[in-house]
Image (cartoon, rainbow, N blue to C red):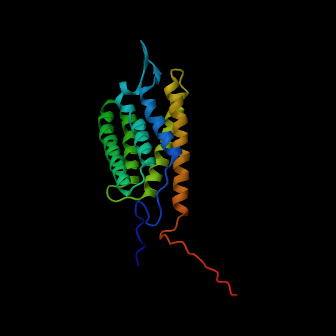
């Protein structure tokens, strides 16, 4: 006997918007354009260092996933998560040549995120778990980065938005975990009065 597969959006209920996940993801994406560290001449943004872009791009994807309410939108979001994870894996192979320890860690994290999202099929719960993983990775990454004296406002805001993304996705997963696999219709009772 096989358990029923939970669809992206269970029938019988409308998908809720995730305001904390959406705002945190959007803020993380916007931090890509803010000064992050002091450079030799002027402050540098993450756009100037492409290997540092994945956390910000994941934030943008989760911002979109938080507001899309249809199964089609979630399917597109899953495709974006897969594509971004594949780009991280392929990019880490190039980084291994330049800086082996950093590239190895990036390869490990990219493969882990790709395994969480999966290569085929998906569910809203897997998306939420991927959000928890991305949020946790970003909290550690920006937390260490913030401890350096060169960190600027972009890193501080990215850390705050990463914490928001982590908390929002934990709440999202908790809510999905408490749902039943099969959504039952609401029952109505009628009381007949005898005269």
Residue closest to the far bottom: 195
Judge by depth and name the residue closer to the eye, 51 or 72: 72
Q: In which quarter of the image is the C terminus?
A: bottom right
Residue closest to the far front: 195
Judge by depth and name the residue closer to the eye, 115 or 160: 160
In this picture, is 184 found above or below 194?
above
Q: Position of residue 122 (x, y in %)?
A: 38, 58
In this picture, is 9 found above or below 89?
below
Q: Which residue is drawn at 44% across and 43% down?
A: 63
Q: How many numbered discs? A: 0
Figure quadrant of residue 104: top left
In this picture, is 96 found above or below 130?
above
Q: Where is residue 21 in the image (x, y as percent from the top left)?
A: 50, 45
In this picture, is 170 found above or below 1?
above
Figure quadrant of residue 46: top left
Judge by depth and name the residue closer to the eye, 140 or 35: 35
Q: Which residue is drawn at 49% across and 54% down?
A: 16
Q: Where is residue 167 in the image (x, y as percent from the top left)?
A: 56, 46
């Amino acid at each position: 006997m096989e358990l029923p597969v939970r669809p992206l959006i269970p029938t019988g209920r409308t998908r809720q918007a995730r305001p904390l996940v959406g705002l945190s993801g959007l803020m993380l994406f916007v931090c890509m354009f803010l000064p992050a560290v002091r450079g030799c001449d002027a402050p540098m943004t993450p756009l100037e260092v492409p290997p540092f872009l994945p956390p910000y791009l994941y934030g943008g994807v989760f911002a979109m996933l938080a507001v899309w309410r249809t199964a089609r939108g979630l399917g597109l979001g899953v495709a974006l998560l897969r594509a971004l994870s594949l780009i991280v894996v392929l990019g880490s192979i190039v980084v291994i040549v330049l800086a082996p320890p950093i590239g190895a860690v990036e390869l490990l994290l990219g493969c882990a995120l790709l395994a969480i999202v999966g290569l085929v099929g998906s569910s809203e719960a897997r998306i939420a778990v991927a959000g928890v993983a991305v949020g946790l990775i970003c909290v550690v990454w920006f937390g260490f980065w913030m401890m350096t004296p060169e960190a600027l406002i972009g890193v501080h805001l990215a850390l705050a938005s990463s914490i928001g993304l982590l908390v929002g996705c934990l709440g999202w997963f908790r809510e999905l975990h408490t749902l039943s696999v099969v959504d039952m219709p609401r029952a109505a009772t009628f009381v007949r009065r005898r005269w």
